[in-house]
Amino acid sequence: MFAKRRSMPPGKVITVGFGGTIFLGALLLTLPFATRDGRGASFFDALFTSTSATCVTGLVLHDTWSYWSLFGQLVILLLIQIGGMGVVTMAIAVFLFTGKKIGLRQRCVMQESIAAPQVGGIVRLTSFIVKCTLIIEGSGTLLLATRFCPEFGFGKGLWYSLFHSVSAFCNAGFDLMGGKGKFSSLTTYSQDPVVNFTVMLLIIIGGIGFFVWHDIREHHLRFKLYRLHTKLVLLTTVLLLVVPAVFFFFAEFGRPEWGFKNDGERLLASLFQTVTPRTAGFNTVDLTIAAEPTILIMILLMITGGSPGSTAGGYKTTTLATLVLAVRAVFKREDSLQSFGRRFPTDTLRHAAALFLLYNTLFIFGGAAICSIDKIPLLSALFETASAIGTVGLSLGVTPQLSMVSHFILILLMFFGRVGGLTLIFAMTSKLAPSVSRMPKENITVG
């Protein structure tokens, strides 16, 4: 048994690691003292919450503040931290702190866990990730404490600051603002620039990925020296922040329903609602009164998500960039994908196409299934499934009212979205023998 476990492929190690963490978290949340009423949660409710926290999604069946006790909230916070950094990353971090030797196999699993380009230097990269995470989350806690401590008192305010800093950096979207109204998220802070910009920065930093941090640390602001990965991530991220924000400002927050907001508040709301679908799950406005085009744009942002090797979900910014470059290559009749003076390997486009098709197929069919089962509008169902598979956590308020079957669909989508499509596929197909022959080639007509 031990030999079999040692020979387990990295993809299966990651999948089993996430599954085990979710199950353990669910058991802890069923304990009587995990809920405020002292009766504990049902196993299914605990499983849904544990999956949402570990997969850093943020979809909830119960308001986090009013339903879960301090112990339950602490369990959720730990699951968010483990899920955000990755189960394997956290395990390697423990090895580093305890001084235990890290073998080649652990390094290979770590490489796949954070999608690192190579095994070499993986331990140093892990140490860098852990240190940066602590510094960034600590800084976010201090900034949020300037608002929460005066409002809630020192102890409670500090706990709120830490919880929301970790939740934002890990792109989870869980909040403790239920005391101001159940499922209210950060709507009462829609006009507070400190809370808004702190949370937005934490989301963006967590979502651009560990490799980008490392590249920026090495080369500072010298863009030409960045790796191709970093250049594409930064360019795509900027475009996905600017273009939707402009749309939201004029098309959504220019509507009469938002007439009570001045231009500064509209701009702040536009920026926040652009950042949070990528894939954090906080909201500062009531999304149930948003127009359908806005909901559609948010769905597309949720499916896209953050960047590889980050705390975010989705099919990732580099996947979108690769597909856009493929379209450009077709239009320009180029025989390869090129960007910033570099040419892409063929496998990059294959992986991007596979991920794009998988994510969109699962979110569409999941939405159609929930629409049929619970008789809710299709756009609302698609919003929930996009939020689940993109590990976002935004909701139009229908999640608690869905049936158990629909909740189970969301659980599966959250797990798929956090572990990663390719990781799950490789985990299921890792023992397949490689083909030793090649089929005859024949062209087909496309388009």
Image (cartoon, rainbow, N blue to C red):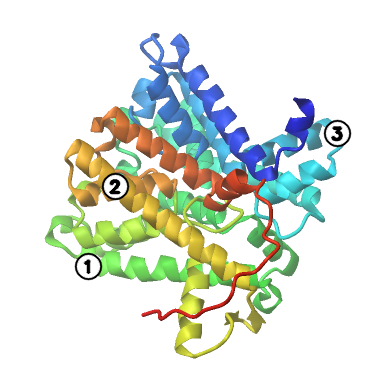
Q: Which of pointers 2 and 1 indicates the residue nearer the eye?
A: 2
Report the disc number at residue 263: none
> Hey, which quadrant is residue 308 in on the image?
bottom right
> Hey, which quadrant is residue 222 in on the image?
bottom right
Which mark sits nearer the N-terminus, 2 or 3?
A: 3
Q: Residue at x 43, y 67 (%)?
A: 240
Q: Could you tell me which secondary element the residue under label 1 belongs to? A: helix
Where does the image place residue 380, in percent across and percent down from the top left? 23, 47
Report the disc number at residue 367: 2
Mark 2: which amino acid?
Answer: Gly
Which mark sits nearer the N-terminus, 2 or 1?
A: 1
Q: Which of pointers 2 and 3 indicates the residue nearer the eye?
A: 2
- Left or right for 248, reference 110: left
Where does the image place residue 8, in percent across and percent down from the top left? 71, 38
CB-based contact (under 8 Å), mark 1 and mark 3: no
Q: Residues within 10 Å of mark 3 (few under 14, many from 20)?
A: few
Q: Residue at x 48, y 67 (%)?
A: 320
Where does the image place residue 129, in percent across and percent down from the top left? 69, 48
Mark 3: which amino acid?
Answer: Gly
Mark 1: which amino acid?
Answer: Ala
User: Where does label 1 land, which residue?
Assistant: 251
User: Where does label 3 land, which residue?
Assistant: 99
Q: Could you tell me which secondary element the residue under label 2 belongs to? A: helix
Which mark sits nearer the N-terminus, 1 or 3?
A: 3
